[in-house]
Amino acid sequence: MCGISGLVAHQPLTPEQQSAVARMNSALAHRGPDGEGSHSHPHALLAMRRLSIIDLAGGWQPIYNEDRSLAVTCNGEIYNYVELRPPLEARGHRYTTHSDVENILHLYEDHGLDFVHHLRGMFALALWDEPRKRLVLARDRMGEKPLYLYETGQQLYYASELKALLKSGVIALDLDPEAIHDYFHYHYIPEPQTAIKGVRKLSAGHLLVVDTDPWQVREIQYWDMLAAEPLERDPATTLCAMLDEVAELVIRADVPVGVALSSGLDSSAVAALAARKYPGTLQAFSVGYPGELENDERAGARDLAAHLKLPFHEIELKTPEMVAEFPDLVYSRDDPIADISGYGYYMVQKASRAAGVPVMLQGQGGDELFWGYGWVRQALRKSEARRHDSRPGVRNLWASREFVLPTGFNRAGLGPAGYALGGLVPTWQRFRRRTTAPAERLIFYDLARDYAHARQQVAGIYTRSFQSAICSRPSRHFTFKQPWPHLPSLFTRLISQTYLLENGIAQGDRLGMASAIELRLPLLDYRLVETVIGLRKVSPDHHLPPKHWLKQALRGQLPEWVLERPKRGFEPPVRQWHAALFQAYGRNLVDGWLVQQGILAPLSAMRLSIGEFPKNNNVPLSFKALVLEMWVRRMQAEMP
């Protein structure tokens, strides 16, 4: 595990370019506090910072093949490194380390660009091929490890974090209007875009091949979960076996391992599976709030830790400390991500580092793979109905089953019913959205309340000049050419490539690495994902209760009182924290950076600065604006 950065160019590198890479590598020290390394060539410079997890003494990077014609740096872990080595040695390859990363070189020697198909794990890597004068960049299938790119002329910079690229001094802090418009709708920026013009991410499951002479850049998608083969098997027994296999792989480390434990099913499953396989003592970490509020996770987590005989560490999150840490939290996320619950993950990782546990397991992915979100299930049903119901005209209002009559006009309900004309206004709005939207657009994120609110309100907070710079709609991320593929699988990919990737995975990686913690997400093992999709193609499960397959697979491995607990997560006292943050920082929006750069209209910024929080919102526009304002100020302050 580490952070990587570098540069490849058509012309020989200048001292100034080499200094830029040195600055990028220095900016990644938090990802790799144990040391650094580099490989230099007239046309390329590969740099890295190391966090020692496997082969502590011998796994220093760059790692070279036998004749040193290949060099590799890698951020992440190749979980199946034990299984890869014997057949490669049998074919004559000679190893110089016991590192998981060395397998990459020998696989590339044997298979060329197909080497990536043999890797099982999380990774972002850079491989220099000296004979071909070629740089190969690759990112894991689910996007657990990040890789940012900046291409200018015939040179390409890359780094594990955006802040490192900005440290190079070759990129201006110029916000991309399309990306910022997306951000105000989603509260994050869907990849491959970033907030900065000219900077993008290498997409998950992709290779980037850069030949220096002649200069050529090719991006190749090597994996898509939709390509998984259909599986005619019993879901419970098949998934049980696959989860057991994953648990065997993800606990491999030469340092202590812990688990972030809430009272929810996903983290409980990871804890139970890992505890059975881990040869040492797995340690559990959880968060709570003063006064043991209703949303406190500790009691449920503590009960399971006791059942599994795990040492239990608990962290109490206090509002004043959260407010004080907020600027660092925003900066550590690297991307602007307006998720107030991220502070819990941030503090869990800090506690893990303080306890001497540098590897942390977490349960992200269960909701996305097993229908944990009600609005996603609803969106799928509506999209299926839209595909099958092409009858035109107003009669579709009844056929679409979106015609909602008021259920009552008692005194308590008269206000909202009157406001919505007894339910006719929202019904008509849904009908209009469905019948006027392009045929290629799925019904998806427009069912999420924050997205719908932003669509209605966000244009009113922009300046006219910024509004005129926006040329595309955020709905492009869930617009696909007809005929649509298998919709349940497509929706799984869609929620995985948006909310999971840019809110969950991105926060997990950056907030973990901010404390030099390697975060592992067992439920995102690509073989497990392919298994879920393959089963789903034969036996659709979105009509079953949430997480039905996962619960069936875990019976016998988790107590029934865990399996039947309601869905929970690291959910903070949102409105209390929101009010405290705006009391401390809200004034930054008044004549702030976003106003001065012509993004927010001054009167809108003034209104947002008081922290308005509409009743039905989870992430209001005011909070999105505050996070973006503080993010860009901190990024600007850190630039050379």
Image (tube, rainbow, N blue to C red):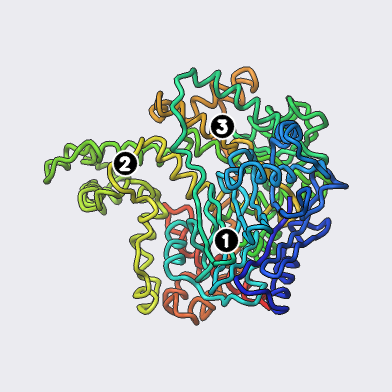
Which residue in the protein does label 3 denote?
Answer: 528
Disc 1/disc 3 C-alpha distance (Å)? 31 Å
Given the image, on which type of amino acid does mark 2 rest? Trp
Give residue 455's quadrant in the image.
bottom left
Given the image, on which type of amino acid does mark 1 rest? Val
Residue 210 marker: 1
Nearest to N terminus: mark 1 or mark 3: 1
- The extreme right residue here reads 57
Answer whether residue 418 is visible to the viewer in this image.
no
> Circle 1: is it few (<14), some (14-19), or many (20+) Cα within 10 Å?
many
Where residue 427 appears, as percent x and y from the top left, is 23, 46
> Circle 3: is it few (<14), some (14-19), or many (20+) Cα within 10 Å?
many
Which residue in the protein does label 2 denote?
Answer: 484
Q: Nearer the viewer, residue 183 or 6?
A: 6
Nearest to N terminus: mark 1 or mark 2: 1
Where residue 391 appears, as percent x and y from the top left, is 14, 40
Disc 2/disc 3 C-alpha distance (Å)? 24 Å
Instruction: Answer whether labels 1 and 3 touch (C-beta < 8 Å).
Output: no
Residue 467 against residue 200 in the figure, above or below: below
Please tell me whether mark 3 sits on a helix, a strand or a loop: helix
Q: Residue at x 54, y 78 (%)?
A: 593
> Circle 2: is it few (<14), some (14-19), or many (20+) Cα within 10 Å?
some
Nearest to N terminus: mark 2 or mark 3: 2
